[in-house]
Image (cartoon, coloured by chain):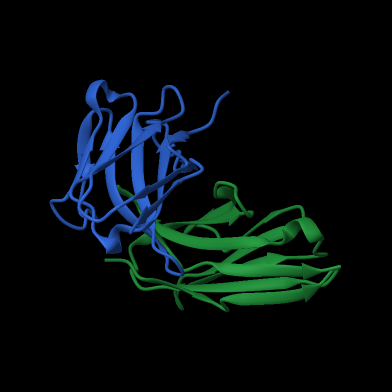
Chain colours: A blue, B green
Amino acid sequence: EAGVTQFPSHSVIEKGQTVTLRCDPISGHDNLYWYRRVMGKEIKFLLHFVKESKQDESGMPNNRFLAERTGGTYSTLKVQPAELEDSGVYFCASSPGTSGVREQFFGPGTRLTVL
Amino acid sequence: GENVEQHPSTLSVQEGDSAVIKCTYSDSASNYFPWYKQELGKRPQLIIDIRSNVGEKKDQRIAVTLNKTAKHFSLHITETQPEDSAVYFCAASSYGNNRLAFGKGNQVVVIP
């Protein structure tokens, strides 16, 4: 079974540009999460989808970040316009919708560098 | 929100010795505590987790202990091997709230 995949693996952009990150969860997983790790700090929660609905977006830093999950399959996270402090590794994770199963499976991350 | 603290930030151990990483959490409603291992260039992977209805869980050379009263939990790795070298993250979440609150990570280096 394929794990969570993310694209691209690396992205280097200039301040003010737009970047779109993509996450493909494990097939059949209803829950999809986005997290971010800024260098040297903890992995921080951004938001949680259940199928195509945003269940919890309390971690989104500001309105320059837009996440979508049309059709309840893959998800995109757009940063527009990017700022220097947006640099970091963006992780996606997924988990099944089965009650009681709480393990989250992580993707390899997208390393975003904003210059 | 939940705040998870992780200590120490770096830990070096001789191969064959034991390693212990400690985490504290702030939210008494937290009831699920996973540990993730991230090897260089790879994705974080769950290695063990514990729920608040038990105090200890073991899986071969790794174990996790939980003290709900003191709000801390620890990862124990025995008979360390070079392949145990990685960054280890502790996390916490509460029932009905799937988001994980992570510690800052701990770099474990096993010296052959």
The vertical placement of B69 against A12, above or below, is below
Q: Is residue B59 left or right of residue A80?
A: right
- The residue drawn where x is 48% and y is 33% is A4
| Image quadrant assignment for residue B5 | bottom left
The quadrant in which the N terminus of chain A is found is top right
Q: Position of residue A54 (x, y in %)?
A: 20, 38
Q: Position of residue A74 (x, y in %)?
A: 34, 27
- Inspect this view and state whether residue B100 appears: no
Seen from the viewer's position, the closer of residues A37 and B36 is: A37
Q: How many marks?
A: 0
Seen from the viewer's position, the closer of residues A62 and B21 is: A62
Q: Is residue A62 left or right of residue A13?
A: left
Q: Position of residue B112 (x, y in %)?
A: 86, 67
- Inspect this view and state whether residue A105 appears: yes
The vertical placement of A24 against A115, above or below, is above
- The residue drawn where x is 72% and y is 71% is B19
- The residue drawn where x is 23% and y is 47% is A17
Seen from the viewer's position, the closer of residues B71 and A26 is: A26
Q: Is residue B44 left or right of residue B69?
A: right
